[in-house]
Amino acid sequence: MSAGQEASRFRTRAARALKGEPPPAEVTGPVLRKLVADSAAMLKRGPLDARSRASAARQHALDNLEELHDRLRSRLEARGVTYHRCSTGEGAAQVVRDLLGDARRVAKSKTMVGEEIGLTPFLREGGLAVLETDIGEYIVDIEGQGPSHVTAPALHLNRSRIKELLAGAGSDVGTDDPVTLSRHIRDIVSTFFDDCDATITGANTTIAGSGRLVAVENEGNVALGVSHPAKHIVVTGLEKIVAEDEDALAILEVLAPSATAQPLTAFTHLLGDPPPGQERHVVFVDNGRSEILANERYRDILRCIRCGACMNACPVYTVAGGLAYGSPYMGPVGAVLSPLLWPEGGFSDLPGASSLCGRCSEVCPVGIPIHRMLLDLRADDGYAQTTGFAEKAAWKLWAATYGDPARARIAGTSGRVLARLSSALPFVSLPLGAATEERARARREPRNEVAYSPDPAPEAPPNERIALLIQRLQDLGVKVVPQKPSARDGDRVLGAAAAVAGTGSLLLTGSSASRREILAAERVIVRVDPGTVVDHPNALAPYISDGQDSLILTGASRTADIEKQIVRGIHGTEELVVVVGPTSSHRESEIPVTPGGR
Ligand code: SF4
Protein backbone atom coordinates (compact mmCIF):
# COMPACT_ATOMS: atom_id res chain seq x y z
CA MET A 1 0.00 0.00 0.00
CA SER A 2 1.39 3.38 -0.96
CA ALA A 3 1.87 6.27 1.44
CA GLY A 4 -0.82 8.20 -0.42
CA GLN A 5 -3.34 5.44 0.03
CA GLU A 6 -2.37 5.12 3.65
CA ALA A 7 -2.86 8.83 4.21
CA SER A 8 -6.47 8.64 3.15
CA ARG A 9 -7.37 6.04 5.73
CA PHE A 10 -8.41 8.15 8.70
CA ARG A 11 -10.00 10.84 6.54
CA THR A 12 -12.08 8.30 4.65
CA ARG A 13 -13.24 6.49 7.75
CA ALA A 14 -13.92 9.71 9.64
CA ALA A 15 -15.93 11.07 6.73
CA ARG A 16 -18.01 7.88 6.69
CA ALA A 17 -18.63 8.21 10.40
CA LEU A 18 -19.71 11.82 10.00
CA LYS A 19 -22.15 10.78 7.29
CA GLY A 20 -23.55 8.14 9.63
CA GLU A 21 -22.44 5.09 7.65
CA PRO A 22 -23.30 2.85 9.43
CA PRO A 23 -25.62 4.74 11.81
CA PRO A 24 -23.64 5.50 14.97
CA ALA A 25 -24.85 4.94 18.49
CA GLU A 26 -26.77 8.16 19.09
CA VAL A 27 -25.68 8.23 22.69
CA THR A 28 -21.94 8.45 22.09
CA GLY A 29 -21.37 12.22 22.30
CA PRO A 30 -23.58 12.96 25.33
CA VAL A 31 -22.37 9.82 27.10
CA LEU A 32 -18.73 10.75 26.67
CA ARG A 33 -19.28 14.35 27.78
CA LYS A 34 -21.02 13.15 30.93
CA LEU A 35 -18.30 10.58 31.51
CA VAL A 36 -15.58 13.21 31.38
CA ALA A 37 -17.41 15.35 33.95
CA ASP A 38 -18.15 12.35 36.18
CA SER A 39 -14.54 11.17 35.97
CA ALA A 40 -13.29 14.55 37.14
CA ALA A 41 -15.70 14.43 40.08
CA MET A 42 -14.66 10.88 40.97
CA LEU A 43 -10.97 11.81 40.87
CA LYS A 44 -11.65 14.68 43.27
CA ARG A 45 -12.80 12.14 45.84
CA GLY A 46 -9.37 10.53 45.85
CA PRO A 47 -6.21 11.48 47.66
CA LEU A 48 -4.52 14.76 46.88
CA ASP A 49 -1.51 13.17 45.22
CA ALA A 50 -3.17 10.26 43.40
CA ARG A 51 -2.22 11.31 39.89
CA SER A 52 1.34 12.22 40.75
CA ARG A 53 1.87 8.88 42.57
CA ALA A 54 0.43 6.94 39.64
CA SER A 55 2.62 8.84 37.22
CA ALA A 56 5.70 8.33 39.39
CA ALA A 57 4.99 4.59 39.65
CA ARG A 58 4.83 4.28 35.88
CA GLN A 59 7.91 6.44 35.35
CA HIS A 60 9.92 4.41 37.85
CA ALA A 61 8.94 1.26 35.99
CA LEU A 62 10.14 2.63 32.66
CA ASP A 63 13.40 3.82 34.19
CA ASN A 64 14.11 0.42 35.73
CA LEU A 65 12.38 -1.92 33.30
CA GLU A 66 15.01 -4.63 32.96
CA GLU A 67 15.75 -4.82 36.68
CA LEU A 68 12.03 -5.09 37.46
CA HIS A 69 11.56 -7.84 34.90
CA ASP A 70 14.42 -9.78 36.46
CA ARG A 71 12.79 -9.50 39.89
CA LEU A 72 9.38 -10.39 38.55
CA ARG A 73 10.65 -13.45 36.73
CA SER A 74 12.12 -14.91 39.92
CA ARG A 75 9.02 -14.05 41.98
CA LEU A 76 6.74 -15.63 39.41
CA GLU A 77 8.84 -18.74 39.23
CA ALA A 78 8.69 -19.02 43.02
CA ARG A 79 4.90 -19.02 42.66
CA GLY A 80 4.99 -21.71 39.99
CA VAL A 81 4.11 -19.25 37.20
CA THR A 82 6.16 -19.38 33.98
CA TYR A 83 7.57 -16.14 32.57
CA HIS A 84 7.86 -15.64 28.79
CA ARG A 85 9.12 -12.66 26.82
CA CYS A 86 8.61 -12.22 23.09
CA SER A 87 10.21 -9.62 20.86
CA THR A 88 7.56 -9.67 18.13
CA GLY A 89 3.80 -9.94 17.97
CA GLU A 90 3.97 -12.91 15.64
CA GLY A 91 6.36 -14.66 18.01
CA ALA A 92 4.07 -13.97 20.97
CA ALA A 93 1.03 -15.39 19.16
CA GLN A 94 3.00 -18.53 18.32
CA VAL A 95 4.18 -18.89 21.93
CA VAL A 96 0.57 -18.67 23.14
CA ARG A 97 -0.47 -21.26 20.53
CA ASP A 98 2.30 -23.60 21.69
CA LEU A 99 1.39 -23.11 25.35
CA LEU A 100 -2.21 -24.01 24.62
CA GLY A 101 -1.03 -27.44 23.51
CA ASP A 102 -3.97 -29.73 22.91
CA ALA A 103 -6.53 -27.24 24.26
CA ARG A 104 -9.47 -26.85 21.89
CA ARG A 105 -11.83 -24.44 23.62
CA VAL A 106 -10.31 -21.17 24.80
CA ALA A 107 -12.09 -18.43 26.75
CA LYS A 108 -10.51 -15.07 26.06
CA SER A 109 -10.99 -12.00 28.19
CA LYS A 110 -10.19 -8.49 27.09
CA THR A 111 -6.51 -7.94 26.35
CA MET A 112 -5.52 -4.97 24.23
CA VAL A 113 -2.20 -6.63 23.48
CA GLY A 114 -4.13 -9.65 22.23
CA GLU A 115 -5.87 -7.29 19.78
CA GLU A 116 -2.50 -5.77 18.89
CA ILE A 117 -0.97 -9.11 17.90
CA GLY A 118 -4.11 -10.49 16.23
CA LEU A 119 -4.32 -13.35 18.69
CA THR A 120 -7.92 -14.42 18.24
CA PRO A 121 -7.83 -14.76 14.42
CA PHE A 122 -4.46 -16.49 14.65
CA LEU A 123 -5.77 -19.11 17.07
CA ARG A 124 -8.98 -19.60 15.10
CA GLU A 125 -7.02 -20.14 11.90
CA GLY A 126 -5.27 -22.92 13.82
CA GLY A 127 -8.60 -24.61 14.47
CA LEU A 128 -9.23 -23.50 18.06
CA ALA A 129 -12.65 -22.41 19.30
CA VAL A 130 -12.01 -19.01 20.88
CA LEU A 131 -14.80 -17.14 22.64
CA GLU A 132 -14.52 -13.47 23.58
CA THR A 133 -16.02 -13.47 27.07
CA ASP A 134 -16.29 -9.74 27.80
CA ILE A 135 -19.77 -8.69 26.66
CA GLY A 136 -18.52 -5.74 24.62
CA GLU A 137 -15.78 -7.83 23.06
CA TYR A 138 -18.27 -10.58 22.24
CA ILE A 139 -20.45 -8.05 20.41
CA VAL A 140 -17.64 -6.50 18.37
CA ASP A 141 -16.30 -9.97 17.59
CA ILE A 142 -19.53 -10.98 15.88
CA GLU A 143 -19.64 -7.59 14.15
CA GLY A 144 -16.11 -8.17 12.83
CA GLN A 145 -14.77 -4.59 12.88
CA GLY A 146 -12.89 -4.62 16.17
CA PRO A 147 -13.29 -2.46 19.28
CA SER A 148 -13.96 1.26 19.03
CA HIS A 149 -12.83 2.17 22.55
CA VAL A 150 -10.30 0.64 24.94
CA THR A 151 -12.73 0.29 27.83
CA ALA A 152 -16.06 0.23 25.93
CA PRO A 153 -15.43 -1.88 22.84
CA ALA A 154 -19.01 -1.65 21.49
CA LEU A 155 -19.48 2.06 22.14
CA HIS A 156 -20.20 2.66 18.44
CA LEU A 157 -23.16 0.26 18.38
CA ASN A 158 -26.66 1.03 19.54
CA ARG A 159 -29.03 -1.51 21.06
CA SER A 160 -31.00 -2.22 17.89
CA ARG A 161 -27.82 -2.93 15.92
CA ILE A 162 -26.61 -5.24 18.69
CA LYS A 163 -29.93 -7.08 18.57
CA GLU A 164 -29.48 -7.49 14.79
CA LEU A 165 -25.92 -8.74 15.22
CA LEU A 166 -27.03 -11.33 17.76
CA ALA A 167 -29.82 -12.46 15.46
CA GLY A 168 -27.29 -12.80 12.64
CA ALA A 169 -25.17 -14.98 14.93
CA GLY A 170 -28.12 -17.27 15.61
CA SER A 171 -29.49 -15.67 18.80
CA ASP A 172 -32.85 -14.04 18.16
CA VAL A 173 -33.35 -12.43 21.55
CA GLY A 174 -36.62 -10.76 20.55
CA THR A 175 -35.93 -7.42 22.23
CA ASP A 176 -33.34 -4.67 22.19
CA ASP A 177 -33.49 -4.19 25.95
CA PRO A 178 -29.85 -3.85 27.16
CA VAL A 179 -30.57 -5.94 30.27
CA THR A 180 -31.90 -8.86 28.22
CA LEU A 181 -29.17 -8.54 25.60
CA SER A 182 -26.42 -8.41 28.25
CA ARG A 183 -27.79 -11.39 30.16
CA HIS A 184 -28.20 -13.40 26.99
CA ILE A 185 -24.51 -12.96 26.15
CA ARG A 186 -23.64 -13.64 29.79
CA ASP A 187 -25.40 -17.00 29.52
CA ILE A 188 -23.50 -17.92 26.34
CA VAL A 189 -20.22 -17.09 28.07
CA SER A 190 -21.14 -18.93 31.25
CA THR A 191 -22.02 -22.09 29.31
CA PHE A 192 -18.71 -21.91 27.44
CA PHE A 193 -16.80 -21.78 30.73
CA ASP A 194 -18.47 -25.05 31.79
CA ASP A 195 -16.43 -26.86 29.17
CA CYS A 196 -13.33 -24.92 28.25
CA ASP A 197 -9.70 -25.96 28.37
CA ALA A 198 -7.86 -22.71 28.82
CA THR A 199 -8.28 -19.00 29.30
CA ILE A 200 -6.36 -15.99 28.03
CA THR A 201 -6.54 -12.72 29.92
CA GLY A 202 -4.62 -9.47 29.96
CA ALA A 203 -3.01 -7.79 32.95
CA ASN A 204 -3.34 -4.11 33.82
CA THR A 205 -0.01 -4.40 35.51
CA THR A 206 2.33 -6.90 37.09
CA ILE A 207 4.18 -6.35 40.35
CA ALA A 208 7.89 -7.15 40.47
CA GLY A 209 8.23 -7.11 44.26
CA SER A 210 5.40 -9.49 45.05
CA GLY A 211 5.06 -11.43 41.80
CA ARG A 212 1.38 -10.55 41.62
CA LEU A 213 -0.63 -10.04 38.45
CA VAL A 214 -3.24 -7.30 38.50
CA ALA A 215 -6.38 -7.40 36.36
CA VAL A 216 -9.45 -5.23 36.73
CA GLU A 217 -12.92 -5.95 35.39
CA ASN A 218 -16.60 -5.48 36.10
CA GLU A 219 -18.34 -8.53 34.69
CA GLY A 220 -16.63 -11.50 36.37
CA ASN A 221 -15.42 -13.18 33.17
CA VAL A 222 -11.81 -12.68 34.29
CA ALA A 223 -12.74 -14.09 37.71
CA LEU A 224 -14.03 -17.19 35.92
CA GLY A 225 -10.98 -17.33 33.70
CA VAL A 226 -8.38 -17.13 36.46
CA SER A 227 -10.11 -19.73 38.61
CA HIS A 228 -11.83 -22.33 36.41
CA PRO A 229 -9.85 -23.63 33.40
CA ALA A 230 -6.82 -25.87 33.87
CA LYS A 231 -4.60 -23.42 32.00
CA HIS A 232 -4.40 -19.63 32.32
CA ILE A 233 -2.25 -17.54 29.99
CA VAL A 234 -1.74 -13.84 30.61
CA VAL A 235 -0.75 -11.76 27.58
CA THR A 236 0.43 -8.24 28.27
CA GLY A 237 2.82 -5.53 27.15
CA LEU A 238 6.45 -5.41 28.22
CA GLU A 239 5.85 -2.11 29.97
CA LYS A 240 3.01 -3.39 32.16
CA ILE A 241 5.05 -3.73 35.32
CA VAL A 242 5.55 -1.76 38.52
CA ALA A 243 7.95 -2.20 41.40
CA GLU A 244 5.74 -2.80 44.45
CA ASP A 245 2.16 -3.37 45.58
CA GLU A 246 1.93 0.33 46.56
CA ASP A 247 2.66 1.32 42.97
CA ALA A 248 -0.11 -0.90 41.68
CA LEU A 249 -2.52 0.59 44.21
CA ALA A 250 -1.50 4.07 43.06
CA ILE A 251 -2.47 3.14 39.51
CA LEU A 252 -5.74 1.60 40.65
CA GLU A 253 -6.69 4.84 42.41
CA VAL A 254 -6.79 6.68 39.08
CA LEU A 255 -7.58 3.93 36.59
CA ALA A 256 -11.30 3.27 37.12
CA PRO A 257 -12.16 6.89 37.98
CA SER A 258 -10.51 8.05 34.75
CA ALA A 259 -11.88 5.20 32.64
CA THR A 260 -15.49 4.85 33.71
CA ALA A 261 -16.00 7.25 36.63
CA GLN A 262 -16.13 4.32 39.03
CA PRO A 263 -14.21 4.37 42.32
CA LEU A 264 -12.77 0.94 41.46
CA THR A 265 -14.03 -1.80 39.16
CA ALA A 266 -16.25 -4.51 40.65
CA PHE A 267 -13.36 -6.99 40.69
CA THR A 268 -9.75 -6.01 41.20
CA HIS A 269 -7.68 -9.18 41.02
CA LEU A 270 -4.31 -9.19 42.75
CA LEU A 271 -3.37 -12.70 41.71
CA GLY A 272 -0.93 -14.63 43.85
CA ASP A 273 -0.32 -18.35 43.44
CA PRO A 274 -2.37 -20.16 40.78
CA PRO A 275 -5.25 -22.20 42.22
CA PRO A 276 -4.48 -25.90 42.83
CA GLY A 277 -4.26 -27.83 39.58
CA GLN A 278 -3.99 -24.77 37.34
CA GLU A 279 -1.01 -24.01 35.08
CA ARG A 280 -0.30 -20.30 34.65
CA HIS A 281 1.94 -18.46 32.19
CA VAL A 282 2.68 -14.77 31.62
CA VAL A 283 3.67 -13.71 28.10
CA PHE A 284 5.24 -10.27 27.84
CA VAL A 285 5.12 -8.74 24.36
CA ASP A 286 7.74 -6.25 23.23
CA ASN A 287 6.66 -5.69 19.60
CA GLY A 288 8.45 -2.35 19.24
CA ARG A 289 8.21 -1.13 22.81
CA SER A 290 11.97 -1.30 23.34
CA GLU A 291 12.47 1.08 20.42
CA ILE A 292 9.87 3.47 21.83
CA LEU A 293 11.54 3.29 25.24
CA ALA A 294 14.85 4.28 23.68
CA ASN A 295 13.30 7.34 22.02
CA GLU A 296 13.40 10.30 24.40
CA ARG A 297 10.61 12.11 22.57
CA TYR A 298 8.09 9.32 22.80
CA ARG A 299 9.04 7.00 25.67
CA ASP A 300 6.50 8.65 28.01
CA ILE A 301 3.68 7.11 26.00
CA LEU A 302 4.65 3.81 27.66
CA ARG A 303 3.40 5.23 30.95
CA CYS A 304 -0.11 4.75 29.54
CA ILE A 305 -2.47 2.70 31.73
CA ARG A 306 -5.14 2.33 28.96
CA CYS A 307 -7.83 4.19 30.85
CA GLY A 308 -9.32 5.72 27.70
CA ALA A 309 -9.79 9.15 29.32
CA CYS A 310 -7.99 10.88 26.44
CA MET A 311 -10.45 9.46 23.91
CA ASN A 312 -13.43 10.39 26.08
CA ALA A 313 -12.24 13.99 26.12
CA CYS A 314 -11.08 14.20 22.50
CA PRO A 315 -13.38 16.17 20.17
CA VAL A 316 -12.04 14.36 17.10
CA TYR A 317 -12.57 10.91 18.62
CA THR A 318 -16.05 11.88 19.79
CA VAL A 319 -17.07 12.83 16.27
CA ALA A 320 -15.12 10.34 14.15
CA GLY A 321 -15.45 7.31 16.45
CA GLY A 322 -12.82 4.73 17.32
CA LEU A 323 -13.11 2.64 14.16
CA ALA A 324 -11.92 5.57 12.05
CA TYR A 325 -8.41 5.07 13.44
CA GLY A 326 -8.17 1.57 11.91
CA SER A 327 -5.98 0.50 14.83
CA PRO A 328 -6.47 -1.49 18.02
CA TYR A 329 -5.35 1.71 19.75
CA MET A 330 -7.61 4.62 18.95
CA GLY A 331 -8.12 8.18 20.10
CA PRO A 332 -5.20 10.42 21.08
CA VAL A 333 -3.19 7.58 22.63
CA GLY A 334 -3.74 5.51 19.49
CA ALA A 335 -2.71 8.42 17.29
CA VAL A 336 0.65 8.43 19.10
CA LEU A 337 1.13 4.73 19.76
CA SER A 338 0.00 3.25 16.43
CA PRO A 339 2.58 4.92 14.18
CA LEU A 340 5.29 4.15 16.75
CA LEU A 341 4.38 0.47 17.10
CA TRP A 342 3.93 0.02 13.35
CA PRO A 343 6.26 2.51 11.59
CA GLU A 344 5.52 0.81 8.27
CA GLY A 345 1.94 -0.05 9.12
CA GLY A 346 -0.02 2.73 7.49
CA PHE A 347 -0.76 4.77 10.61
CA SER A 348 1.44 7.74 9.81
CA ASP A 349 -1.60 9.94 9.15
CA LEU A 350 -3.05 9.44 12.63
CA PRO A 351 -1.15 12.28 14.35
CA GLY A 352 -3.29 14.51 12.14
CA ALA A 353 -6.42 13.19 13.85
CA SER A 354 -6.32 15.87 16.49
CA SER A 355 -7.80 19.32 16.96
CA LEU A 356 -4.79 20.21 19.13
CA CYS A 357 -7.01 21.45 21.92
CA GLY A 358 -4.85 19.71 24.52
CA ARG A 359 -7.76 18.07 26.36
CA CYS A 360 -6.05 14.67 26.08
CA SER A 361 -3.02 15.80 28.05
CA GLU A 362 -5.21 17.55 30.63
CA VAL A 363 -7.22 14.47 31.52
CA CYS A 364 -4.42 11.89 31.32
CA PRO A 365 -4.07 10.56 34.89
CA VAL A 366 -0.39 9.71 34.45
CA GLY A 367 0.58 13.04 32.94
CA ILE A 368 1.53 11.97 29.42
CA PRO A 369 2.08 15.04 27.20
CA ILE A 370 0.02 13.51 24.42
CA HIS A 371 -0.59 16.61 22.35
CA ARG A 372 3.10 17.49 22.43
CA MET A 373 3.86 14.03 21.02
CA LEU A 374 1.19 14.46 18.35
CA LEU A 375 2.90 17.67 17.30
CA ASP A 376 6.32 15.99 17.30
CA LEU A 377 4.98 13.13 15.19
CA ARG A 378 3.54 15.60 12.70
CA ALA A 379 7.01 17.03 12.29
CA ASP A 380 8.45 13.59 11.54
CA ASP A 381 9.07 12.40 8.00
CA GLY A 382 6.47 9.62 8.06
CA TYR A 383 3.64 12.05 8.68
CA ALA A 384 5.05 14.59 6.25
CA GLN A 385 4.85 11.98 3.45
CA THR A 386 1.10 11.75 3.97
CA THR A 387 0.48 15.47 3.69
CA GLY A 388 0.75 18.23 1.18
CA PHE A 389 3.57 20.75 0.89
CA ALA A 390 1.87 23.45 2.98
CA GLU A 391 1.17 21.18 5.91
CA LYS A 392 4.60 19.60 5.70
CA ALA A 393 6.19 23.05 5.80
CA ALA A 394 3.97 24.10 8.70
CA TRP A 395 5.06 21.20 10.86
CA LYS A 396 8.69 21.64 9.97
CA LEU A 397 8.27 25.23 11.14
CA TRP A 398 6.60 24.00 14.30
CA ALA A 399 9.50 21.63 14.99
CA ALA A 400 12.00 24.40 14.44
CA THR A 401 10.08 26.72 16.75
CA TYR A 402 9.40 24.33 19.57
CA GLY A 403 12.67 22.44 19.31
CA ASP A 404 14.43 25.45 20.84
CA PRO A 405 13.44 26.27 24.44
CA ALA A 406 13.82 30.06 24.08
CA ARG A 407 11.80 30.20 20.87
CA ALA A 408 9.25 27.81 22.34
CA ARG A 409 8.71 30.11 25.33
CA ILE A 410 8.08 33.06 23.06
CA ALA A 411 5.70 31.08 20.88
CA GLY A 412 4.00 29.49 23.83
CA THR A 413 3.35 32.81 25.56
CA SER A 414 0.93 33.95 22.95
CA GLY A 415 -0.31 30.60 21.64
CA ARG A 416 -1.25 32.40 18.44
CA VAL A 417 1.47 30.71 16.38
CA LEU A 418 0.03 27.31 17.08
CA ALA A 419 -3.53 28.45 16.56
CA ARG A 420 -2.63 29.91 13.16
CA LEU A 421 -0.78 26.77 12.18
CA SER A 422 -3.70 24.66 13.26
CA SER A 423 -6.29 26.72 11.42
CA ALA A 424 -4.13 26.70 8.29
CA LEU A 425 -4.02 22.93 8.14
CA PRO A 426 -6.18 21.46 5.43
CA PHE A 427 -6.85 18.36 7.48
CA VAL A 428 -8.69 20.02 10.33
CA SER A 429 -11.12 21.67 7.99
CA LEU A 430 -11.77 18.53 5.95
CA PRO A 431 -14.23 16.10 7.52
CA LEU A 432 -14.09 17.59 10.94
CA GLY A 433 -16.27 20.64 10.96
CA ALA A 434 -18.18 19.07 13.81
CA ALA A 435 -14.91 18.49 15.60
CA THR A 436 -14.21 22.19 15.38
CA GLU A 437 -17.57 22.84 17.02
CA GLU A 438 -16.65 20.34 19.72
CA ARG A 439 -13.40 22.15 20.29
CA ALA A 440 -15.21 25.45 20.61
CA ARG A 441 -17.63 23.89 23.07
CA ALA A 442 -14.73 22.43 25.05
CA ARG A 443 -13.23 25.86 25.33
CA ARG A 444 -16.48 27.36 26.58
CA GLU A 445 -17.07 24.64 29.15
CA PRO A 446 -15.17 24.47 32.42
CA ARG A 447 -11.88 22.62 32.06
CA ASN A 448 -11.56 19.14 33.44
CA GLU A 449 -8.81 20.20 35.73
CA VAL A 450 -8.71 18.23 38.92
CA ALA A 451 -8.53 20.74 41.73
CA TYR A 452 -7.93 18.16 44.38
CA SER A 453 -9.88 18.51 47.58
CA PRO A 454 -9.67 15.06 49.11
CA ASP A 455 -12.87 13.67 50.57
CA PRO A 456 -12.53 12.39 53.17
CA ALA A 457 -9.48 14.17 54.57
CA PRO A 458 -6.50 11.80 54.92
CA GLU A 459 -6.91 11.63 58.68
CA ALA A 460 -10.68 11.19 58.82
CA PRO A 461 -11.91 10.30 62.32
CA PRO A 462 -12.94 6.63 62.59
CA ASN A 463 -16.66 7.35 62.92
CA GLU A 464 -16.63 9.56 59.80
CA ARG A 465 -14.67 6.90 57.97
CA ILE A 466 -17.25 4.24 58.84
CA ALA A 467 -20.10 6.54 57.85
CA LEU A 468 -18.43 7.21 54.52
CA LEU A 469 -17.84 3.48 53.93
CA ILE A 470 -21.53 2.79 54.52
CA GLN A 471 -22.52 5.61 52.18
CA ARG A 472 -20.19 4.41 49.43
CA LEU A 473 -21.39 0.81 49.79
CA GLN A 474 -25.00 1.93 49.51
CA ASP A 475 -24.12 4.02 46.45
CA LEU A 476 -22.89 0.78 44.88
CA GLY A 477 -26.16 -1.00 45.61
CA VAL A 478 -24.72 -3.01 48.51
CA LYS A 479 -26.94 -3.75 51.47
CA VAL A 480 -25.30 -2.74 54.77
CA VAL A 481 -26.53 -4.27 58.03
CA PRO A 482 -25.30 -4.17 61.65
CA GLN A 483 -25.66 -7.92 62.23
CA LYS A 484 -25.29 -11.01 60.12
CA PRO A 485 -28.64 -11.85 58.50
CA SER A 486 -30.29 -15.23 58.94
CA ALA A 487 -28.46 -17.90 57.00
CA ARG A 488 -29.80 -19.08 53.64
CA ASP A 489 -28.75 -21.94 51.40
CA GLY A 490 -26.18 -20.65 48.94
CA ASP A 491 -24.73 -18.02 51.28
CA ARG A 492 -21.03 -17.41 51.31
CA VAL A 493 -19.93 -15.57 54.45
CA LEU A 494 -16.49 -14.00 54.38
CA GLY A 495 -14.38 -11.75 56.53
CA ALA A 496 -12.79 -8.76 54.84
CA ALA A 497 -9.12 -8.25 55.60
CA ALA A 498 -9.82 -4.52 55.21
CA ALA A 499 -12.27 -2.10 53.63
CA VAL A 500 -11.86 1.24 51.88
CA ALA A 501 -14.16 4.07 52.93
CA GLY A 502 -13.52 6.31 49.93
CA THR A 503 -14.43 3.65 47.37
CA GLY A 504 -16.73 1.25 49.26
CA SER A 505 -14.31 -1.59 48.53
CA LEU A 506 -13.74 -4.85 50.40
CA LEU A 507 -10.35 -6.56 50.48
CA LEU A 508 -10.49 -10.36 50.57
CA THR A 509 -7.31 -12.34 50.98
CA GLY A 510 -6.20 -15.98 50.99
CA SER A 511 -9.03 -18.50 50.95
CA SER A 512 -11.60 -15.70 51.26
CA ALA A 513 -10.50 -14.53 47.80
CA SER A 514 -11.54 -17.81 46.16
CA ARG A 515 -13.26 -16.68 42.96
CA ARG A 516 -14.77 -20.11 42.43
CA GLU A 517 -16.66 -19.95 45.70
CA ILE A 518 -17.61 -16.29 45.44
CA LEU A 519 -18.97 -16.78 41.92
CA ALA A 520 -20.87 -19.89 42.99
CA ALA A 521 -22.65 -18.16 45.88
CA GLU A 522 -26.23 -17.00 45.63
CA ARG A 523 -25.56 -14.33 48.25
CA VAL A 524 -22.20 -13.03 49.45
CA ILE A 525 -22.04 -11.68 53.00
CA VAL A 526 -18.86 -9.87 54.00
CA ARG A 527 -18.04 -8.95 57.56
CA VAL A 528 -16.01 -5.77 58.05
CA ASP A 529 -14.19 -5.01 61.27
CA PRO A 530 -14.39 -1.21 61.78
CA GLY A 531 -10.78 -1.28 62.93
CA THR A 532 -9.64 -2.30 59.45
CA VAL A 533 -11.33 0.46 57.47
CA VAL A 534 -8.89 2.73 55.63
CA ASP A 535 -9.50 5.97 53.76
CA HIS A 536 -8.19 5.16 50.28
CA PRO A 537 -6.87 2.14 48.33
CA ASN A 538 -3.26 3.26 48.80
CA ALA A 539 -3.60 2.35 52.51
CA LEU A 540 -4.38 -1.30 51.68
CA ALA A 541 -0.74 -2.27 51.09
CA PRO A 542 -0.07 -3.52 54.66
CA TYR A 543 -3.10 -5.80 54.42
CA ILE A 544 -1.91 -7.52 51.26
CA SER A 545 1.80 -7.55 52.01
CA ASP A 546 1.90 -11.18 53.08
CA GLY A 547 1.95 -12.30 49.47
CA GLN A 548 -1.44 -13.97 49.51
CA ASP A 549 -3.84 -14.10 46.64
CA SER A 550 -6.11 -11.06 47.01
CA LEU A 551 -9.33 -9.74 45.54
CA ILE A 552 -10.86 -6.30 46.00
CA LEU A 553 -14.65 -6.32 45.60
CA THR A 554 -16.31 -2.98 44.84
CA GLY A 555 -20.01 -3.67 44.47
CA ALA A 556 -21.58 -6.59 42.65
CA SER A 557 -20.56 -7.64 39.15
CA ARG A 558 -21.98 -5.44 36.42
CA THR A 559 -21.64 -4.34 32.83
CA ALA A 560 -22.31 -1.13 30.94
CA ASP A 561 -21.27 -2.40 27.52
CA ILE A 562 -24.59 -1.67 25.80
CA GLU A 563 -25.29 2.05 25.52
CA LYS A 564 -23.57 2.48 28.89
CA GLN A 565 -26.67 1.21 30.69
CA ILE A 566 -25.64 -0.50 33.94
CA VAL A 567 -26.77 -4.11 34.30
CA ARG A 568 -25.89 -5.70 37.65
CA GLY A 569 -25.28 -9.35 38.47
CA ILE A 570 -23.43 -10.61 35.38
CA HIS A 571 -21.19 -13.45 36.61
CA GLY A 572 -21.74 -14.05 40.29
CA THR A 573 -24.46 -12.84 42.55
CA GLU A 574 -26.13 -9.46 42.42
CA GLU A 575 -26.74 -9.72 46.15
CA LEU A 576 -23.85 -8.41 48.23
CA VAL A 577 -24.41 -7.77 51.94
CA VAL A 578 -21.89 -6.12 54.26
CA VAL A 579 -22.00 -6.51 58.02
CA VAL A 580 -20.09 -3.72 59.73
CA GLY A 581 -19.10 -4.78 63.22
CA PRO A 582 -16.24 -6.35 65.19
CA THR A 583 -15.43 -9.96 64.35
CA SER A 584 -12.88 -12.21 65.97
CA SER A 585 -12.15 -14.29 62.90
CA HIS A 586 -12.82 -12.31 59.78
CA ARG A 587 -10.79 -14.42 57.39
CA GLU A 588 -12.80 -17.58 57.95
CA SER A 589 -15.65 -18.77 55.82
CA GLU A 590 -18.46 -19.66 58.21
CA ILE A 591 -21.11 -21.15 55.99
CA PRO A 592 -20.17 -23.36 53.07
CA VAL A 593 -21.64 -22.49 49.74
CA THR A 594 -24.31 -24.78 48.38
CA PRO A 595 -22.73 -27.03 45.76
CA GLY A 596 -23.72 -26.48 42.15
CA GLY A 597 -24.29 -23.40 40.09
CA ARG A 598 -21.67 -20.79 39.49
S1 SF4 B 1 -2.71 8.24 27.27
FE1 SF4 B 1 -3.33 8.79 29.36
S2 SF4 B 1 -5.54 9.27 29.18
FE2 SF4 B 1 -4.97 8.15 27.29
S3 SF4 B 1 -5.44 5.99 27.72
FE3 SF4 B 1 -3.27 6.34 28.27
S4 SF4 B 1 -3.29 6.83 30.47
FE4 SF4 B 1 -5.40 7.08 29.73
Image (tube, helix red, strand yellow):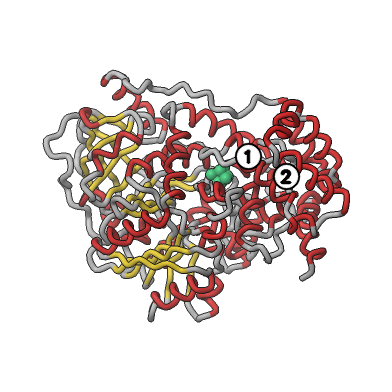
Residue 360's disc is: 1
| 52 horizontally vs 23: left or right | left
Q: Secondary structure at mark 2?
A: loop
* Disc 2 packing (10 Å; few <14; some 14–19; many ≥20): many
| 532 horizontally vs 260: left or right | left
Residue 504's disc is: none
Split into 4 quadrants, where in the image is the C terminus?
bottom left
Q: Which residue is depicted at the point 66% across and 51% down?
A: 335
Q: CA distance from mark 1 to mark 2?
A: 10 Å
The answer to the question of whether label 1 and label 2 lie on touching residues, with beta carbons closer than 8 A, is: yes
Q: Can you give x and y, in whole percent of width and height, for residue 233 in the image?
A: 39, 66
Q: Is residue 308 visible?
A: no
Task: Name the N-terminal-most of marks 1 and 2.
Answer: 2
Split into 4 quadrants, where in the image is the N terminus?
bottom right
- The amino acid beneath tag 1 is Cys
Q: Quadrant of residue 264?
A: top left
* Disc 1 packing (10 Å; few <14; some 14–19; many ≥20): many
- Residue that label 2 marks: 354
* Mark 1 residue CB less than 8 A from any atom of ligand 1: yes
Q: Quadrant of residue 117?
A: bottom right
- Residue farthest to the left, as pictured: 584
Q: Which residue is depicted at the point 76% across and 60% down?
A: 9
Q: Nearer the viewer, residue 120 or 237?
A: 237
Q: Secondary structure at mark 1?
A: helix
**Quadrant field for ligand 1:** top right
Q: Quadrant of residue 69?
A: bottom left
Q: Can you give x and y, in whole percent of width and height, for residue 105 in the image?
A: 42, 74
Q: Can you give x and y, in whole percent of width and height, for residue 122 in the image?
A: 54, 74
Question: Is residue 83 placed above or below 262 in the rendered structure?
Answer: below
Q: Which residue is depicted at the point 28% across and 51% down?
A: 210
Q: Nearer the viewer, residue 199 or 487?
A: 199
Q: Is residue 536 visible?
A: yes
